[in-house]
Each structure stands twice: as structure tokens, then as C-alpha cells.
Image (spheres, coloured by chain):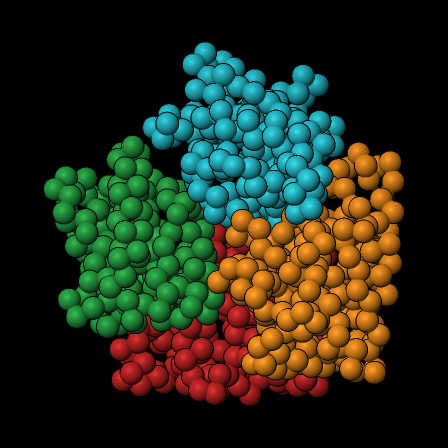
Chain colours: A red, B green, C orange, D cyan
Amino acid sequence: MKILLFAGSLRKDSLNKKVVRFTDKLLKSNLDLKTTVVDLQTLNIPVYDGDIETAGIPEGVKTLAALVASANAIIISSPEYNGSMSSPLKNTLDWLSRVKPLPITKKPILMLGASPGALGATRGLAHARWPLETLGNFLYPEAMGFMHADQAFDENEDLKDPVQLAKLQKLINSFIEYAGKLK
Amino acid sequence: MKILLFAGSLRKDSLNKKVVRFTDKLLKSNLDLKTTVVDLQTLNIPVYDGDIETAGIPEGVKTLAALVASANAIIISSPEYNGSMSSPLKNTLDWLSRVKPLPITKKPILMLGASPGALGATRGLAHARWPLETLGNFLYPEAMGFMHADQAFDENEDLKDPVQLAKLQKLINSFIEYAGKLK
Amino acid sequence: MKILLFAGSLRKDSLNKKVVRFTDKLLKSNLDLKTTVVDLQTLNIPVYDGDIETAGIPEGVKTLAALVASANAIIISSPEYNGSMSSPLKNTLDWLSRVKPLPITKKPILMLGASPGALGATRGLAHARWPLETLGNFLYPEAMGFMHADQAFDENEDLKDPVQLAKLQKLINSFIEYAGKLK
Amino acid sequence: MKILLFAGSLRKDSLNKKVVRFTDKLLKSNLDLKTTVVDLQTLNIPVYDGDIETAGIPEGVKTLAALVASANAIIISSPEYNGSMSSPLKNTLDWLSRVKPLPITKKPILMLGASPGALGATRGLAHARWPLETLGNFLYPEAMGFMHADQAFDENEDLKDPVQLAKLQKLINSFIEYAGKLK
């Protein structure tokens, strides 16, 4: 089974990119899985503009669309911006929705989120589900928000708290089982 | 009273830009109002990226922030993308939220929306309210969605349907009264 | 596979009860399915009150909880009240969430909705997904809203429009396949 | 100015009723305000049912509708049930929306919320805004969630934490000023 992982924020030191890399590390212990991590910043996707689309779908969108289309499941870790989903995530989804055939549909998706605050991006995760479901994807009901995420990782970028680690491992296992059933 | 108007889509032939221009025309008959229409496409705002922010807030964001800060009220006409708010609108709000002092707070805001479909962008308008309220703005409770908007305007870019026109005029009058009270 | 169906409104002539009965008729042609239709009005469930709960979970809640627990999948047809989910549906879910062990979790759920208006209860369906997902259920991404539903059924309570009928039949088939995979 | 306050939960020992009573105490120091606290449990409102409505709007709904209609502003403190608004609150709003003329429209409304958990009912507050705005009310953008509310009050039912108290007092003052402008 092929799993695609990406973060919903662009900056290099993104806490959500750390969550993605750590989750990828956990997945790698399962030899049945082939994982790909993509960094949205490197794709240089512009803000959605119908005039750009008419001139041609940007290369970064095409690259991501191919990765999404070939994945059996997707894991997204995204911050919350202004009480709602991040604009890089929404913008990426809006571009993907313009590619024919639609690459991001009928995909099992797990939402994670990290923030330095006390709410752990939970409102942002809730809002991000809706466009993904509108596009026809299978959102895993449980999500996980990492609060105070700036303190959550050690110098090896491993999650420090064993309780949180066990929770994430269990969530990933359940999600992989769910994605396997829907394949 | 100064009113700022903009559309939540970028492309030149945007239906929402037509709604903005027509609303501006209606507002101009009220001599107490000074209106400004801004076209987000001309501002060249990139997707929000903390690394860009560290290097310096983009000029387009600064330009818009100054216009927003000096406005007494804002009218936004925005499409719906994938059942939720448009990414150009969300991205613009996320950038504005990074400007100090926060320009987009305590502003009376009216939401309009247009789509060629039968739902008139109503779900998108509903979702867009939340980040605007999180930022502390006064969202006017009533909104107006123009369905089948590709058929709604004549060659002078005037709204064809007198019932819709009367509804829009009444909504604008109520909103201006509301914004005046909150000044 | 056992399918439980119910409407999110209480009144006897509910349009959503008609949608439920017609959907049940369609399901009955599949001999692998065993369907149960429950009418929330007959369950006499009071508004959720912690003091009532302390005195004892109401019998109607226990009856529904047993039906839900034994179902492999659930189909709900619900109206929209004031732009959001119906209070009978939310109230029923809030009571079910107090039963131990939680009966309404990990259930594949299909949302339908009917209204006499032009939006077909679509905003209500969207809002109702969230508490169901919070409880850990597998919401089927596609939903179907019947607009102008007061005109949609003939005197045999069959759906008049063959296009709508074909769409509903296809949606039900996809949902049953999805629920079968998740069993 | 007349302020109506009520909690979105029914049980006698409700944390949200404590928030309402304490907020009422703070408001009473302002001699320009006349406050009324109503306890929804005493109104005995059934779950919304069109058949009950046809037989006659329940007395508890009429009583509340009269209080709402005569209020200049409303303060609601509501718990979160299953990640969304409480069913007693949604049910009360759905009944009020059936009274003619609509009592709950164009009212300035402040949302508070309390929960024993770490999120302080914030998701529930967000969801409850939408039906209130759909009905045409002026929701104050800022809300306040009391987390760990079971530990928040002393034996006189006063808020223990001076920082939280100062925040609530400031929020109330801003809301009263807002409601005064919209009168």
C-alpha cells in the first residue's frame, strides 16, 4: 500500500513538517507500506487563479496530482490559521480539484495537526475535512492535534511524550487497517 | 464613510468581480459614501509562507492592509471552491492577519457571492464568515448569493432581474445603516 | 448486512420519512440486506437533560441504542432547521452518546435530506456530519438532498423523477459496497 | 437596556448556569442595565415536532419568546455536546424560529461556554453561531470558553481566577457597548 504524506504549511521549520517526518518514520517499520513525503514549498504552487489555469495547470500541481493519484491513502498534518484551515492546504486542494481526472477522490485520508498553542489546531482540522469530503474522499473520523508542538520533539525529531507516541501509533495502525479495507 | 470592496477570486472575467462593480455602482448614488474597489489579482500576493513573511511582508499585502485599515466597512463577493471558501480569499485573510497592528478587526463586513450553479456560493459564504469573526470583525448576518450568475448581468454589467436588484439595494441600505451605527 | 434507517424529523407527514420509506423500498430488492425503519416520534425521547439521565436513560433511547448497536450501517434522512442540523437529530445523537458502550461509533452512515425549498437541506446535512464524525463514525462522503421534496413523490410514495431515482439507486449501491468493505 | 441571560443546558448543577448567574452578578453593578435570567429546564420545552406545533406552540416557548422579544441583548452560556452545539440550545432556537413575529432576530448576542475539559466548549460555541446568524442576529465576534469550569468557581459561586474575571468583565463591557450602538 502506498501512503502519501504532506504538511499544510510551507515554511522550512514548520511544526507540521516535523509531525509528517515523524509519522513517516513510524510507518517505515511496516514493510507492507511504501511512503512518500512531499514538501509543498518545493512545488511553488501559486494562489489559484482561473487565468493561470487557462494558460496551463502549474507544474507543481501536476507533480502533486500524480503523487496523489497513485497513493492508496494520504496523511496530512496541517496548522490552523485564524480558526480555520490553512490557506496553503486549501489552495493546494483547490488546484488539485481542477485536474482531470480528479486525483483526490475516494482516498482514505488521516488528518493530523500541530500548533504551539493549547488547542492543537483542532478547529483547523475540523474545517479542512469539509472540502476533502466534498471532493469525495474517505476522511478517517479520528484526528489528532499536537498542542504545544514546539516543545513536543527532541533533538532527533522524535516525539518526547510516550503517551502521545502510543496514541499516534495506535491511530496510524487503525487508519492503515481502514485504508486497507477501502482499497 | 469609506467602503472597501473586493472579490474573492482572481481571474479577470470573475463573476464576483462583476458583483463588486455593480454593488459599487449602487453605492455611488449615496453621496455620503466614498468607495474603493481593489482587484486582488493586481496585488500579486503569494501563498502564505512563514519564510516569505520573515523576509518581509509582500508589498501587495501592505497595500491591501492600508486600504482595509482606513475603511469603515468592507463588502466581499466571493465564490465557493469545493464546498468552502475560496483559497484566494482565505490566503488574503491569512496574510492580513500577520500585519501589525491587525488591520482587519472590528470592521463591519457584508458577504456576497456569485456562482454559475444553483446554490449561489452559499456554503462558501458560510465558511468564510468564521475566520473573519475569529479576527474580531462584525459580520452582517444576512448575505446574498447570486445563483446562475453567468446569466445575471446585461451588456452594461447591470443586474437584469429587478427583484434581485431590489433585494441587493435593500441589503446594502441595511448594511450601511449597521456599519454607521458601529462606527 | 443489517441497515437501520430513520428520519431526523418527528411529524407524521415528514418529507424525510417519505425519503426513508422509499429508500427502504429500494434496499428491499437486495436480498442480502435486512432493513429496519424506526420512527423517532414513537420513541418519545425528551430533550437531553443530565438530571433525567441521572434518574435513568429513557426507554426510547435504550430501544434506539440497541437498534443502532446491532446495525452494520445507518441511513439518515434529515431536514435542515435554521441553516443547520435538525434539533430532533442532534438531540437523538446526544442521548445515544450517553449510552455505554457507545452504540453509534464505527458505523458507516449515509446522509440524505429533503426540503420543500431550493437548497434541499444541504447545509443541514453538512452540519450533521460533524457530531457523527466526532463520535467516530464513517460518514459516506457523498450525500443527496431532495429539493422541492413536497412535489417529488407520487401517490404510491414513489419518486417521480427517473433521473433522481437513478441517482439515489446508484448512491445506495455505492454506500452498501462501502459499508460492506468496512464491516 | 434589557439583557436576557440563559444557559444552553438543562440540569440543575449545570456549569453553564453558574457562568450565567456569575455574569448576571457582574452586570448588576451597571445600573443602566435590567437583567433577566431564565432557566430552560423550568420551561419544559419538548423536542421540536411539527405535529405539536400544529396543535399549538408550547407555553414554555411562548414564555421564552416574549422574554427574547423584549430584550435588547442576549447572553448565552452553552456547553458543547459531541463537538457541536448543545441539543437543548438548538431545540430552543428551532422552536423560537416558529413564533410569529420572529422574536430572535436583530438581537446582539454574546456567546459564553463552560466545560470541565481542556477546550472550554469552543467548538460548540462556534457551531451555535450559525443558526443564530441565519436567524438574523448580531453575534458578538469574541466569545469566551471556561475550561476546567468544574474547578473555576468558589463556594460563593464567584470566579476564582482574577485573570479570567478581568477578561470576562472586559468582554461584557465591550459587548454592552456594542449592543448599545445597535439599539
Asked whether the viewer can see residue D80, the reply is: no
Residue B132 place in picture, x, y as percent: 39, 49
Task: For the N terminus of chain C, give its image quadrant.
Answer: bottom right
Q: Is residue D121 left or right of residue A50?
A: right
Q: Residue at x 49, y 78 (%)?
A: A38
Q: Is residue C169 left or right of residue D24?
A: right
Residue A108 place in picture, x, y as percent: 62, 76
Q: Quadrant of residue A61?
A: bottom left
Considering every residue shown, the one lying at the far front of the view is C155
When the figure is inspected, residue D23 is found, relative to residue B98, above or below; the finding is above
- Number of labels in the image equals 0
Who is closer to the viewer here, B21 or B139?
Answer: B21
When the figure is inspected, residue B116 is found, relative to residue D37, above or below; the finding is below
Q: Residue at x 46, y 70 (%)?
A: B82
Task: For the C terminus of chain C, give its image quadrant.
Answer: bottom right
Q: Is residue C121 left or right of residue B18?
A: right
Asked whether the viewer can see residue C17, the reply is: yes
Q: Quadrant of residue B58?
A: bottom left
Q: Residue at x 82, y 56 (%)?
A: C64
Who is closer to the viewer here, B102 or B83?
Answer: B83
